[in-house]
């Protein structure tokens, strides 16, 4: 899939400062070992089935299917994974790797906070010290996750530099790593960054697609027509897509259109002309940047998609036409959350709701012989503050006001 | 040419001094004044950092300077024009320091040709290891410029020799792990590391990361060829203004 320096066509690579070369050599060596060791995958999937909730169900969304009157809609329930999102798959895998490497401290960046919570959980379970870097803007919009990370013993460092969101948290985590690499592993949360991270994170996330493939074949006896996943960095999309390399299955990645692709306030790298190829954060891919190569501000209602770059593997799939990329606006996303809750009693995370919005747009045009799978990468209850605001729920507002008075 | 210049200067000085500025911080005019005072005070080489939005290898001081410069609207073309001016006015070698994306977006070939045209002698690109920079290496060679590579305390002997074979001008030795501008203990450990650097390259050695005052520079005498002062002068400008730079450099 990739060569020695992790290239996927022209994308990827290992643009790292000299101080990290030895650390990356070590990491690549350990990753090769576990990747080639079938016993490791067994250990990993045992851990995921007894500590987390794997295999996660593939739920038939009967009411949504009836509502759109087109394809049969299935939902892959990564929201039922421990800590509420697909992030745990990658984190527990890297945790086992950290144990093998004999390191005692983990650091991570987080946007929505899901990756941070998953990392703090893993650190608690395996007895590692843990520091999480989180943009100040995200700390404000995802306080419940910050609370849980801290309760599990992690130190959460709000990042006040740059645009104060996910990319800035990644820079800060690298700054920690170049100082403390002797005892510290950086648990990068998505299929981005320098080699071997895109390949390694995709490897752990492939458990999603492996399960989904078996499940749909068992339930329906055939493969889906289209599969949908939201795309921030791209780890949940890589996880699902890898299970369906077949020509007959169309992979659709849905990016954050924010206020709209033509407003400049979005986070779409692959389906907006605003992004161009560049090199930052250790790898080459499409970035939202200006003509000088300075990264631009991004916007999404979903903190986890609010990122300037995208997995080099997805950039390659985009270039080769192996996946199609669409986008959904903040408003479409809120509507999709509402509909999914009302029809199925399921609350998708705002990130995942992008995949739902993309799928809803296309479900009706397909026939009842077609099957689509939506990857619900995470659960939405973490987003209660953002969703309640977007819904403009008056009772919620009263509750918050009254609650605030309790603290005065 | 840079190497020859360094060796020539070392005949009359125990150690040379390289300083660093972020172009456009706190302003282009101030940057010009800082260069002026540094050159007048006897600095031997200078790094001109072209600001980048994601300066991964830089610590808080230089990071902030990058951000402020960008917020003030500095563009890459302004930095090139600034570099052209200083290189034509002052008779010391100037190098660019920046991150690879700046070159990549400009076009590596034309960026390097432009460097040669405006009189910049070399470049330090901390996120471009030689394995990723074949185009860059070729362009630098064609324009007879110096690609400066970095040794770190974690770099193996074998790799030091490889980096040395790719580099020209001098080698930049990080005094310690971490990012720029944090405290460094100049101790026996560093002495051993610098001996290892010396044994693995014929090129002159510049030492930076945490070099902040006369005693640090004194410590490096006899162990390295160039002491690099980076974050400390930015801190000085922040605290005492542009006027304090000349005296600070002279005191070293």
Image (spheres, grey):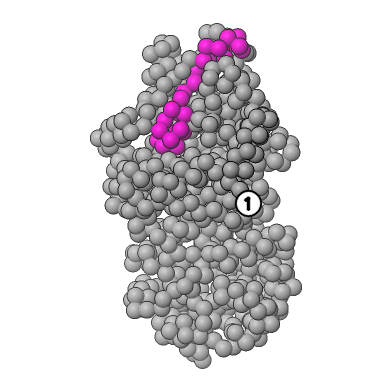
Residue B243 within the magenta-colored segment of the rendering: no
Relative horizontal placement of residue A227, taking residue A297 as reference (left or right): left
| SS type, badge 1 | loop
Q: Residue at x 61, y 48 (%)?
A: A408
Q: Residue at x 38, y 68 (%)?
A: B153
User: What's the magenta region?
Assistant: A61-89
In this orientation, which residue lies closer to the viewer: B76 or B92?
A: B76
Q: Residue at x 43, y 11 (%)?
A: A220
x then y, percent, for residue A212: 42, 22
Q: Residue at x 65, y 83 (%)?
A: B244
Quadrant for the N terminus of chain B, please: bottom right
In this orientation, which residue lies closer to the viewer: A245 or B176?
A: B176
In this orientation, which residue lies closer to the viewer: A344 or B53?
A: A344
| Residue highlighted by disc 1 | A163
Is residue B117 at all visible to an observer of this figure? no
In this orientation, which residue lies closer to the viewer: A386 or B209?
A: A386
């Amino acid at each position: 899939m990739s060569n020695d320096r992790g290239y996927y066509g022209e994308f990827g690579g290992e643009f790292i400062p000299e101080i990290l070369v030895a650390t990356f050599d070590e990491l690549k060596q350990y990753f090769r070992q576990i990747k080639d060791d079938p016993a490791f995958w067994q250990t990993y999937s045992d851990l995921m089935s007894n500590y987390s909730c794997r295999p996660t169900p593939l739920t038939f969304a009967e009411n949504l299917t009836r509502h759109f009157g087109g394809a049969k809609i299935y939902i892959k329930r990564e929201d039922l994974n421990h800590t509420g999102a697909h992030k745990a798959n990658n984190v527990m895998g890297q945790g086992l790797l950290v144990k093998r490497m004999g390191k005692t401290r983990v650091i991570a960046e987080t946007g929505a906070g899901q990756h941070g919570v998953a990392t703090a959980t893993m650190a608690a379970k395996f007895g590692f010290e843990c520091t999480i870097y989180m943009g100040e803007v995200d700390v404000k919009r995802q306080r419940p996750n910050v609370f849980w990370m801290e309760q599990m013993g992690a130190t959460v460092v709000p990042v006040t530099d740059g645009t104060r969101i996910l990319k800035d948290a990644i820079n800060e985590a690298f700054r920690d790593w170049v100082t403390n690499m002797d005892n510290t592993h950086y648990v990068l949360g998505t299929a981005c960054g320098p080699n071997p991270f895109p390949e390694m994170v995709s490897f752990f996330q492939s458990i999603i697609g492996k399960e989904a493939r078996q499940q749909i074949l068992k339930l329906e006896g055939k493969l889906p027509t289209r599969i949908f996943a939201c795309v921030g960095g791209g780890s949940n999309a890589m996880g699902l897509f890898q299970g369906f390399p077949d020509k007959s299955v169309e992979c659709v990645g849905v990016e954050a259109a924010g206020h709209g692709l033509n407003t400049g306030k979005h986070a779409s790298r692959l389906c907006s002309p605003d992004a161009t190829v560049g090199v930052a954060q250790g790898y080459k891919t499409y970035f939202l940047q200006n003509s000088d190569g300075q990264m631009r501000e991004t916007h999404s209602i979903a903190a986890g998609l609010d990122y300037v770059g995208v997995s080099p593997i997805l950039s390659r799939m985009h270039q080769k036409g192996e996946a199609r990329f669409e986008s959904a606006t903040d408003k479409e996303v809120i509507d999709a959350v509402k509909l999914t809750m009302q029809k199925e009693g399921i609350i998708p995370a705002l990130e995942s709701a992008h995949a739902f919005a993309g799928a809803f747009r296309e479900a009706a045009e397909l026939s009842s012989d077609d099957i689509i799978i939506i990857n619900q990468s995470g659960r939405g209850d973490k987003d209660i503050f953002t969703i309640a605001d977007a819904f403009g729920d008056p009772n919620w507002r009263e509750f918050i006001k009254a609650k605030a008075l309790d603290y005065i | 040419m840079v190497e020859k210049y360094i060796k020539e200067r070392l005949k009359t000085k125990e150690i040379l001094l390289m300083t660093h500025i972020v172009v456009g911080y706190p302003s282009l005019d101030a940057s010009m004044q800082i260069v002026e005072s540094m050159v007048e005070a006897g600095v031997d080489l200078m790094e001109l950092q072209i600001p980048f939005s994601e300066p991964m290898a830089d610590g808080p001081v230089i990071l902030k300077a990058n951000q402020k410069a960008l917020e003030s609207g500095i563009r890459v073309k302004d930095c090139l024009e600034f570099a052209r001016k200083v290189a034509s006015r002052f008779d010391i070698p100037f190098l660019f320091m920046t991150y690879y994306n700046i070159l990549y977006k400009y076009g590596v070939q034309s960026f390097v040709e432009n460097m040669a045209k405006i009189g910049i002698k070399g470049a330090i690109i901390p996120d471009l290891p030689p394995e990723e920079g074949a185009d860059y290496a070729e362009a630098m060679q064609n324009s007879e410029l110096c690609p400066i590579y970095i040794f770190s305390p974690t770099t193996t002997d074998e790799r030091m020799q490889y980096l040395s074979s790719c580099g020209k001008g001098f080698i930049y030795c990080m005094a310690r792990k971490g990012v720029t501008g944090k405290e460094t203990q100049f101790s026996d450990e560093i002495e051993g590391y610098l001996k290892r650097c010396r044994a693995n390259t014929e090129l002159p050695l510049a030492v930076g990361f945490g070099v902040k005052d006369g005693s640090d520079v004194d410590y490096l005498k006899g162990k390295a060829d160039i002491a690099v002062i980076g974050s400390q002068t930015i801190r000085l400008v922040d605290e005492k203004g542009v006027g304090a730079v000349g005296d600070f450099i002279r005191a070293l």
